[in-house]
């Protein structure tokens, strides 16, 4: 993983050179960034340039006391000075989300480093030196500053009149969103109805050989063939069997490829595809509602689709929403660890501000938030 490799080199350099000092401070490195599947071309190029030009041995001259996060957005808070004096010249600017290495503390001031993994794209050409400056600790802000206010958790965007509009969900909407604690999120996870989870322990007539996934249904067999990147880069596809929803008589399949993820549900009797989704389905305890939710990396928000299954087994879309301020916490595309239906029929979701997705902060539990979504139907 490209970004992981760079950070590993940087942090390993700090550890290596610090170990030779008589007084070695503990290094509290931030969580290693998960490489996102869709790193932009600009970020990719920027990474290569930094990797080629940044001499990580520069960090060996410093003992890192701790890493802190810069969370403020105001102009004054961003200023870092050449001396512990607000009348001294500016050394550099900080930006919200920067990871800051603290190398000394002098009264109300801290001595900090600015390193090239911050804002790789925006850095001027040949600006690959570690910079040293002074800032007041209180100006860095608090990690809670990065959490979304409640209204942002309720904010949706939609297309109207040829333009994008936004509004806040109200009590009359189908989705009723409330913020809850981490404890509440974890407690209700224990009430998940097991019969409506995929049963992947018994393949039951499902096999994959030579890149062909075969699912045996009552009326016909489903065959899905992988497509390699050599065969078609943009059309590449790998099919994975998710399991069978025994209670709903449905097979689940996940498809991954170049810049896309899809999931499908097939009727276990007819073999017909009954629902196409973007990521992983979750189903309500009564089996009536199926939710597809994913973080759209191009629009920086979450697409939320609510589907209903009638008594005959037919599945149709009820409605869809776009939450423009947050995405599932652990990854853009989410996972069953990020959201689930509880035994009370509510959907529980772990979220993070869209602005932090794709950074090392999506692994920092201090900025995770939790919501409960009830269906007002």
Image: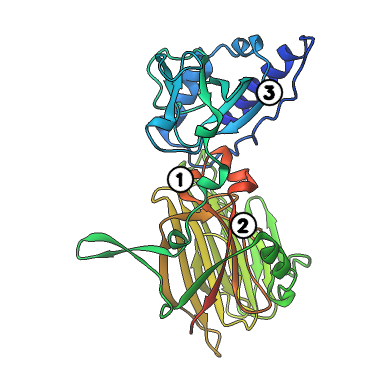
Residue at position x 39%, y 37% from top?
74
Left or right: 247 with respect to 168? right
Residue at position x 56%, y 23% from top?
109
Residue at position x 68%, y 81% from top?
247
Residue 217 occupies quadrant: bottom right
Q: Is residue 190 above or below residue 301?
A: below
Residue at position x 63%, y 84% from top?
286
| Secondary structure type for disc 3 | loop
Neighbor class of circle 1 (other Cα within 10 Å; few <14, some 14-19, many 20+) is: some
The answer to whether residue 1 is seen in the rendering is no
- Residue 355 circle label: 1
Q: Earlier in the sequence, mark 2 or mark 3?
A: 3
Kindly identify which residue carries mark 2. 335
Kindly identify which residue carries mark 3. 65
Residue 6 occupies quadrant: top right
| Secondary structure type for disc 1 | helix
For discs 1 and 3, the disc positioned in front in the rendered view = 3
């Amino acid at each position: 993983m490209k970004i992981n490799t760079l950070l590993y080199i940087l942090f390993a350099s700090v550890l290596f050179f610090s170990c030779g000092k008589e007084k070695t401070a503990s290094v509290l490195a931030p969580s290693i960034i998960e490489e996102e599947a869709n790193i932009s071309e600009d970020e990719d190029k920027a990474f290569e340039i930094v990797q080629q030009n940044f001499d990580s041995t520069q960090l060996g001259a410093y003992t890192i006391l701790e890493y802190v996060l810069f969370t403020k957005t105001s102009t004054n808070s961003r200023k870092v000075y050449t001396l512990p004096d607000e009348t001294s010249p500016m050394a550099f600017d900080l930006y919200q989300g920067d990871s800051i290495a603290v190398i000394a503390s002098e009264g109300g001031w801290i001595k900090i480093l600015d390193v090239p993994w911050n804002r790789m794209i925006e850095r001027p050409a040949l600006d690959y030196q570690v910079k040293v400056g002074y800032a007041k600790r209180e100006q860095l802000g608090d990690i809670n500053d990065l959490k979304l206010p409640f209204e942002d958790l309720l904010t949706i965007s939609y297309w109207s009149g040829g333009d994008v509009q936004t509004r806040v969900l109200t009590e009359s909407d189908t989705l009723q969103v409330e913020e809850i604690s981490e404890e509440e999120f974890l407690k209700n996870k224990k009430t998940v109805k097991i019969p409506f989870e995929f049963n992947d322990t018994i393949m039951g007539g499902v096999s994959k050989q030579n890149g062909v996934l075969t699912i045996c249904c009552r009326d016909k067999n489903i065959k899905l063939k992988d497509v390699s990147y050599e065969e078609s880069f943009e059309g590449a596809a790998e099919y994975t069997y998710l399991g069978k929803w025994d209670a709903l008589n449905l097979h689940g399949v996940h498809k991954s490829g170049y810049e896309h993820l899809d999931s499908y549900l097939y009727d276990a009797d007819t073999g017909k595809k009954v629902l196409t989704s973007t990521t992983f389905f979750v189903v309500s305890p009564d089996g009536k509602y199926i939710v597809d939710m994913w973080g759209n990396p191009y629009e920086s928000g979450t697409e939320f689709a609510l589907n209903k299954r009638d008594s005959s087994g037919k599945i149709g879309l009820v409605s869809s929403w776009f939450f423009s301020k947050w995405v599932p916490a652990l990854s853009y595309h989410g996972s069953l660890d990020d959201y689930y239906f509880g035994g009370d029929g509510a959907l529980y979701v772990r979220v993070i501000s869209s602005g932090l997705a794709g950074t090392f902060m999506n692994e920092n539990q201090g900025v995770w938030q939790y919501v409960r979504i009830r269906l007002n139907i």
